[in-house]
Image: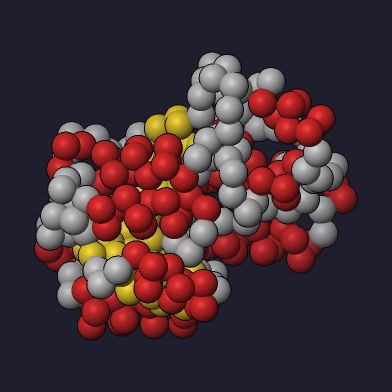
Amino acid sequence: MRLQGKTAIVTGGASGFGAGIAQKFLAEGARVMIADINGDAARDKARQFGLNATAQQVDVSDLASVQAMADAALSTLGQLDILVNNAGITHLPKPLEEVSEDDFDHVFKVNMKSVYLTARAFVPTMKARGAGVILNVASTAGLSPRPNLNWYNASKGWMITATKTMAVELAPSGVRVNAICPVAGETPLLKSFMGEDTPEIRAKFLSTIPLGRFSTPEDMANAACFLCSDEASMITGTALEVDGGRCI
């Protein structure tokens, strides 16, 4: 029960890595708000996960929606101990100059602006308490980019840099900030990363991962739990590769 008595928000928590993280946090004793743009899916997960899980519909790219999530968290959870910025999207693989402006703006808002908006909403109270943990779900794409995912790669590189600068600024206030960098996994985004899901394309992806498999929600959940627990109290500003050796 490494998170006993802690409270947490997991954005994008209704599916994929986010759902795995939320389930692990609950199993380790935390109370968790599952926040997702799909409110029905968030409510379904909260019912599935039990009494210590609550649901909140949120558009992490929208200031008013993020503030509404913060207000709901205050009334439901009281103080917030852990914020997991997991919500993310990608554009389809294509040459960088062919990505539409609308697709670029969507990636920018969900993957990057969301970190700014949640920081505005939650950092002041964490600083006032002198405690808190923020975990950003970045990607190996921000460290070892794949061709034709240029603007997604760039957004995750931005998230890694944001993690480090947030960490160094917030450390004197007792707030830790880290990131995890997953390799492609069995999540709703996998098909988008690959363009199409065929045995041949899967084999090509897997050939770049030394351990020979995709990542799982459980892999991310275990790493997230450690970094958000008191066991990691001396760790801040790191971008942990959870990638089966992909970035070697």
State whether residue 94 is above or below residue 205: below
Residue drawn 85% across and 42% down? Answer: 95
Q: Which image quadrant is residue 124 in? A: bottom left
Residue 182 can be seen in this image: yes
Residue drawn 23% across and 65% down? Answer: 31
State whether residue 44 is above or below residue 91: below
Residue drawn 43% across and 68% down? Answer: 45
Spot occupied by residue 67 in the image (x, y as percentages of width and height): 39, 79
State whether residue 84 is above or below residue 214: below
Residue 116 can be seen in this image: no
Q: Nearer the viewer, residue 172 or 52?
A: 52
Spot occupied by residue 191 in the image (x, y as percentages of width and height): 72, 48
Q: Would residue 92 be found to the left or right of residue 183 on screen?
A: right
Q: Nearer the viewer, residue 60 or 174?
A: 60
Spot occupied by residue 165 in the image (x, y as percentages of width and height): 37, 44
Q: How is the image coloured?
A: secondary structure
Spot occupied by residue 195 in the image (x, y as percentages of width and height): 80, 45
Q: Would residue 118 be found to the left or right of residue 17 on screen?
A: left
Q: Which image quadrant is residue 156 in? A: top right
Residue drawn 74% across and 26% down? Answer: 203
